[in-house]
Image (cartoon, grey):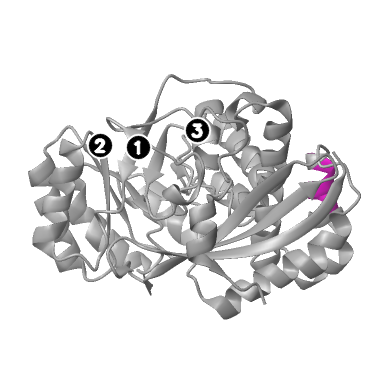
């Protein structure tokens, strides 16, 4: 299982419709920036991170993979995932220029590709390699119907349609104005009824005072969680908000390390833990966060903005994982898509991590890597 080569790739995949927006961004495509790792045994593993499909910034990630990480991996045994994670994460040159951001995103692609290789070599789906199926079903919640760019009537209609399709959880975006967002939240709650979980996501837009004002009025709508209400690194603010409202605080998609999560745990600033394998230097680091969350008896809802099948494997295998996000932009780009049936993710069956691109996606969406 010696590594023969490490090659980056980029796919730019259209989002639902022509454009979507949350409180801070508006995009038309999702970037799948990844690493293809070939071994001397003839196996190939794939991993990727997610971006807003800006080619110039995507190239920063591919150059990091090709120029910084690949030379450290060629000739190594791909099965030594923990040791290789440490070799990349604690390499003096890479650690000096960044312990998060570009280096972490590039590392995520590599780490997932190594897990994909490990599962393929074992001839098993990744969830089996992670220890086996620990739950019968993984509940899906639908975020793709809830963007701020969707008009009020279409938002309500989309939420109703998702419930009719079997989803028992909905998430909508907030962060425009308190008045507009409260109106939209109330309309969706009335339309879907009391038995469907309804979460909200602010994408770090508001300050503490605005969040407190919003939460006082929103508590009547039985909000499942308030995701990223404040700036992503504001531990103190999240802790203050958690004490001021009955709405559980969720966050994690913009945290890159176990140390970052540790501060939120220590200050009791988080109720739902949302690590992302595409941001946190891969599955190896996310597993540590999930274990820590489980030790605090906190539930995990892995962030799945990339609709990564890796998170489906994780959710079936780890006891802390309870629900998982559904955003279907890129799922059909892979040989085993992440499928939702009657509101639950289908258990993956193919060997690997579910990250192998289809030939059609490769031909249609691939971009130059430099």
Residue visible at 54% across and 21% down? 133
Q: What percent of the width, then of the height, locates residue 350?
A: 56, 30
Please identify the quarter of the rendering in which residue 185 is found.
Answer: bottom left
Q: Which residue is mark 2?
A: 167
Q: Nearer the viewer, residue 75 or 97?
A: 75
Q: Is residue 86 left or right of residue 52?
A: right
- Which label's residue is closer to the chain start, 2 or 3? 2
- Between the residue at mark 2 and the residue at mark 3, the CA separation in whole angstroms equals 17 Å
What is the x, y in percent for residue 82? 79, 41
Label 1 vs 3, first from the N-terminus: 1
Q: What number is the disc on residue 315?
A: 3
Label 1 neighbour load within 10 Å: few <14, some 14-19, many 20+: many
Is residue 253 visible to us here?
Answer: no
Of residue 177 and residue 61, the one placed in the foreground of this image is 61
* Residue 84 covered by magenta stretch: yes
Q: Is residue 230 magenta?
A: no
Give the extent of the magenta segment: 82-87
- Distance Cα–Cα, label 2 vs label 1: 7 Å
Res 64 quadrant in image? bottom right
Q: Position of residue 205 (x, y in %)?
A: 37, 69
In the structure shown, which secondary structural element does the residue marked by tag 1 occupy? strand
The reply to whether callout 2 and callout 1 are in contact (CB within 8 Å) is yes
């Amino acid at each position: 299982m010696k590594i023969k080569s490490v090659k980056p790739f980029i796919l730019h995949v259209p989002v639902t419709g022509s454009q979507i927006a949350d409180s801070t961004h508006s995009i038309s495509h999702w970037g799948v920036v990844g690493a293809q790792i070939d071994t001397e045994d003839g196996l190939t593993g794939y991993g990727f991170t997610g971006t807003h499909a800006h080619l110039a910034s995507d190239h920063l990630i591919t150059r990091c993979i090709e120029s910084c990480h690949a030379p450290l991996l060629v000739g190594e045994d791909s099965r030594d995932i923990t040791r290789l994670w440490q070799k990349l994460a604690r390499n003096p040159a890479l650690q000096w220029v960044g312990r998060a951001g570009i280096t972490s995103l590039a590392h995520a692609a590599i780490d997932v590709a190594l897990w994909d290789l490990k599962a393929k070599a074992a001839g098993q789906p990744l969830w089996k390699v992670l220890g086996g199926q620990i739950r019968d079903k993984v509940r899906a919640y639908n975020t793709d119907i809830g963007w701020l760019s969707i008009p009020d009537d279409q938002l309500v209609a989309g939420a109703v349609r998702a419930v009719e399709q079997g989803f028992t959880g909905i998430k909508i975006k907030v962060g425009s104005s308190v008045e507009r967002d409260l109106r939209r939240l109330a309309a969706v709650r009335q339309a879907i009824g009391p038995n469907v979980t309804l979460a909200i996501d602010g994408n770090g837009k508001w300050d503490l005072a605005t969040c407190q004002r919003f939460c006082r009025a929103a508590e009547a709508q039985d909000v499942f969680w308030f995701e990223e209400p404040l700036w992503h690194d504001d531990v103190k603010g999240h802790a203050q908000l958690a004490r001021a409202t009955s709405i559980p605080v969720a966050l994690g998609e913009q945290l890159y390390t176990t140390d970052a999560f540790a501060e939120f745990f220590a200050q009791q600033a988080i109720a739902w833990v949302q690590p992302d394998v595409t941001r946190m230097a891969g599955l190896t680091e996310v597993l540590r966060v999930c274990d820590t969350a489980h030790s605090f008896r906190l539930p995990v809802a892995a962030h799945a903005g990339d609709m990564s099948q890796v998170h489906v494997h994780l959710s079936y295998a780890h006891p802390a994982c309870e629900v998982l996000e559904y955003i279907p932009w890129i799922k059909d780009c892979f040989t085993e898509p992440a499928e939702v049936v009657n509101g639950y993710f289908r258990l993956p069956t193919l060997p690997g991590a579910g990250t192998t691109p289809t030939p059609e996606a490769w031909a249609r969406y691939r971009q130059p890597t430099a």
